[in-house]
């Protein structure tokens, strides 16, 4: 196992976002980690990658895979390498409140006050 594979990015039950995808339509998809799929061959990689069985968690989206005939197929579920996933849910043992300790600042850019230059 290579050094980068000592710690996985995700685990079963996590929500994750897809990153660094070869097929642009897959970039930024939100998926749910269903089960481990083990190590397998993945296009563009000499070494096998650890993959998860995932299902799409974003309404109206799909996972795109290159089929054996070279076409692109759309699916609601399929394999995804851990290398291309980043966890969105906190690790077990952490409360969601620990990650939400500050409220995001939201500004209405249509209001005049927000658009005025500070001098």
Image: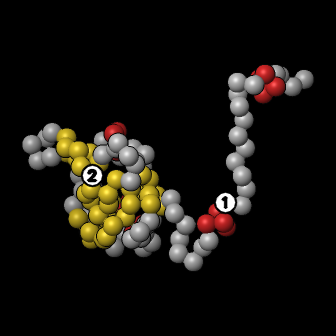
The spot of residue 4 in percent (x, y) is: 42, 66
The first of marks 2 and 1 along the sequence is 2
Between 93 and 82, the residue placed more toward the observer is 93
Looking at the rendered image, the quarter that the N terminus falls into is bottom left
The spot of residue 47 in percent (x, y) is: 27, 63
Residue at point 70%, 48% (across, down): 104
The spot of residue 109 in percent (x, y) is: 70, 27
The residue where tag 2 is placed is 76
Residue at point 38%, 53% (across, down): 57
Residue 49 can be seen, yes or no: no
- The outermost residue toward the front is 59
- The outermost residue toward the right is 119
Between 54 and 80, the residue placed more toward the observer is 54
Q: Is residue 103 left or right of residue 10?
A: right
Residue at point 66%, 66% (across, down): 97
Classify mark 2: residues with Cα within 10 Å, few (<14), some (14-19) or many (20+).
some
Q: Is residue 67 above or below residue 37?
A: above
The spot of residue 67 in percent (x, y) is: 15, 46
Residue 35 can be seen, yes or no: yes
């Amino acid at each position: 196992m290579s050094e980068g594979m000592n710690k996985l990015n995700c685990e079963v039950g996590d929500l994750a976002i897809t990153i660094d995808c070869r097929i642009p339509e897959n970039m930024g998809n939100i998926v749910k980690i269903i089960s481990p799929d083990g190590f397998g061959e993945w296009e563009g990689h000499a070494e096998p990658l650890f993959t998860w069985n995932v299902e799409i968690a974003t309404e109206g989206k799909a996972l795109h895979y290159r089929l054996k005939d070279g076409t692109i197929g759309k699916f609601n579920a399929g394999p995804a390498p851990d290398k291309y996933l980043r966890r969105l849910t906190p690790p077990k043992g952490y409360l969601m409140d620990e990650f939400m300790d500050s409220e995001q600042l939201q500004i209405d850019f249509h209001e005049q006050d927000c658009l005025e230059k500070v001098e």
